[in-house]
Image (spheres, rainbow, N blue to C red):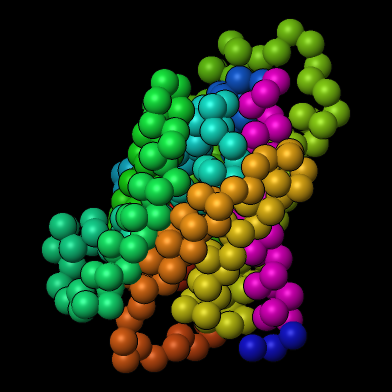
Amino acid sequence: MSRRGWVLFALMGVLWGIPYLMIKVAVDSVSVPMVVFSRTALGAAVLLPLAIRAGQLDAVRRHWRPLLAFTAMEILGPWALLSHAETELTSSMTGLLIAAVPIISVVLARLTGDAERLGPLRWAGLLVGLTGVFVLAWPHLGGGSAWAIGEVMLVAIGYSIAPMIALRRLQGLPSLHMAAFSLAIAAVVYAGPAAVTRPDTLPSGRVLAALAGLGLVCTAFAFIVFFELIREVGTSRGMVFTYVNPAVAVATGVVFLGEPFTGTIMLSFALILGGSVLATVRRGTAPDRPAPVADTGSTTAPSRAVSEGSP
């Protein structure tokens, strides 16, 4: 991989690893609808003009129904549930639970007719990863934490369904357009609830920085960097960064928020990430060649990346 590819790879590992920290900071002072609206509106404000400038708006009109379904599974439900869950859970724990998305994706793919056979290695990966989720969640299965864990698992299911919609129904929609218009739709949906629940006083600079970081850095800039990464190194190699995100989420939570780093977290981290790698390994698959994606590229790459790595 080129030096530029490594730089983009490292950026993506951070850009989709730190949102858990920023969400945790934001939900302590502002409502969940405000967090989701701020992130989607800022992201749309940057990406939507780029998509309009690129043209091909007829593709958006042709795919508006599956685009709505994708938005619901990828953003409308998950980002609100994730933000609400972090009012009870630590950011590091949330990031680790979301790391189970590749495992859930394999299971759902099989249940919905994926013809690919799961060998012993991939079955072992599923069991190991699910064990990691159990180890992480078991001490917290009581009161509000149990509900929050359920919310995160619903997010993981949504993140697993969204790429199926993209793969089967959105192949003709450019990547940039799918990201931009999904964010715009979500911003419109959450504008009303955000207005009703807006804070009476201006939040602190720390909270405003977290909201701005979520929208501009972790959403808009992250998508642009991701498109460049896939164009530089191809989808398969580029997607490896999704296994780095949970480590970043844990590290930032421990360093900046003083969240605990226990033996249980270390064990569950190893089990979930190791299980995800094993469950998604494809024997005999040739590496992807780099392909242009910035304005007209593959729709499956960004949807898979968001589903497996983006909070």
Instruction: Name the residue at 28% across, 62% down.
Output: 127
Total marks in image: 0
Instruction: Name the residue at 68% across, 53% down.
Output: 251
Is residue 250 positioned above or below 55 on the image?
above
Report the magenta stretch's main SS: helix
Is any atom of residue 182 visible in this view? Answer: yes
Closest to the observer, 9 or 148: 148
Q: Is residue 225 left or right of residue 181?
A: right
Residues in magenta, as a range: 4-29
Q: Quadrant of the N terminus?
A: bottom right
Instruction: Name the residue at 63% across, 48% down.
Output: 261
Residue 26 pos. (x, y %): 69, 30
Residue 271 pos. (x, y %): 43, 62
Q: Based on the picture, tell me whether residue 5 belongs to the magenta stretch.
A: yes
For this orientation, the residue located farthest to the front is: 263
For this orientation, the residue located farthest to the top is: 200
Residue 97 pos. (x, y %): 46, 48
Q: Based on the picture, tell me whether residue 298 belongs to the magenta stretch.
A: no
Closest to the observer, 87 or 308: 87
Instruction: Name the residue at 54% across, 44% down.
Output: 93
Residue 304 pos. (x, y %): 43, 62
Is residue 30 positioned above or below 266 on the image?
above
Quadrant of residue 9 within the rendered picture = bottom right
For this orientation, the residue located farthest to the right is: 205
Quadrant of residue 212 within the rendered picture = top right
Is residue 140 positioned above or below 298 on the image?
above
Is any atom of residue 170 visible in this view? Answer: no
Closest to the observer, 113 or 136: 136
